[in-house]
Image (spheres, grey):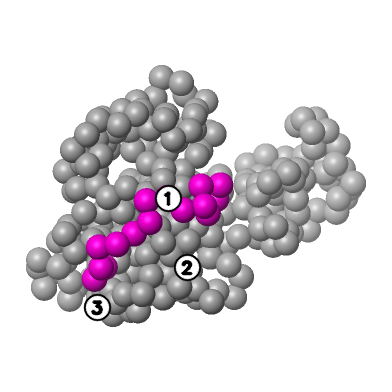
Amino acid sequence: MNSQEAKKLLETMEWEEGAIFPVVEGPYRYRVVVHCSSSGRQKALFANGEHPYFCYIELAGGNGQWIQKGAGIVPVLPDGRFIMVVEQRPAHSRYPDRPMMARIGGLEMNLSHFGPHSSLEFPGGAVDPNEGFKAAFLRELHEETGICNQSALCYTRRHPILPFGSDLSLEQYFSVVFLSGLSYEKHVENDGGLTVFALTREEIDCNIWNGVIRSGQAAILQWGFYKEVELARYNPSFEKTLKEAGYLAVEKIQIAKAK
């Protein structure tokens, strides 16, 4: 459906302040929605006249429900390394000149060896309907790294970030999890198969600086939150300030295999 066809579809719909309805639905998890609003920047002809509106994207689950929230985790091993996964993100491969040589485990590694759309990211995913944030963090952590059966200390950013501002209706929550065990799976079958790596702090910084780590919501924003957590752990006064502001929550958790 092109833009003219979409506008023709609007002519069959009744404009009502605050109404939201899909105009284009993809075969996988994306759909474009029209948001009827008197403050909208665009105008179109609806069944009941010309009115202003907004247009943006939603994520939708297999059941068609709007995915409202996402969870991103920075897992930290007891030796100070960080767990990251190689995801396949076709949108990234639209830019064929992007850097692909990553520094991992003291070696130079070509991410294209793991697939043509490879992206080095922290674990994360959608929060399921009626699922709590902690349950979502733990489920995604286990599904994407195989980590389970251990205690951990969890730092959570209580306020969400909207990673794509005006274009995507998604709240993203971040958590840093300090693990008590060193074991993790090197490969998991979730999401078509994920390769799992442990990187040092210096390697993550290097891979951001050289442009290899480039996913905003799945890596760079989470890394920024980790650095706030790192500062809070070494500065009790700063940690207290963040907690009192309602920004940071800290709790001990138990990671177990999902039932």
Which numbered tag is attached to residue 139?
A: 2
The answer to whether 21 appears left or right of 136 in the picture is right
Q: Is residue 189 magenta-colored?
A: yes
Q: Which residue is rendered at x = 46% and y = 21% of the image?
A: 96
Q: Which residue is rendered at x = 24% and y = 78% of the image?
A: 244
The answer to whether 197 appears left or right of 50 in the picture is left
Q: CA distance from mark 2 to mark 3?
A: 28 Å
Furthest residue in direction top, as rendered = 97
Would you name the residue on which mark 3 appears?
244
Helix, strand or loop at mark 3: helix
The answer to whether 25 appears left or right of 230 in the picture is right
Helix, strand or loop at mark 2: helix
Residue 75 sits above or below residue 52 on the image? below
Amino acid beneath label 1: His
Image location (x, y in percent) of residue 74: 32, 58
Image location (x, y in percent) of residue 253: 33, 79
Q: Which residue is rendered at x = 31% and y = 28% of the image?
A: 101
Residue 236 sits above or below residue 108 on the image? below
- Residue 152, picture quadrant: bottom left
Which numbered tag is attached to residue 187?
A: 1
Q: Nearer the viewer, mark 2 or mark 3?
A: 2
Residue span colored magenta: 179-193
Helix, strand or loop at mark 1: strand
How many marks the image carries: the answer is: 3
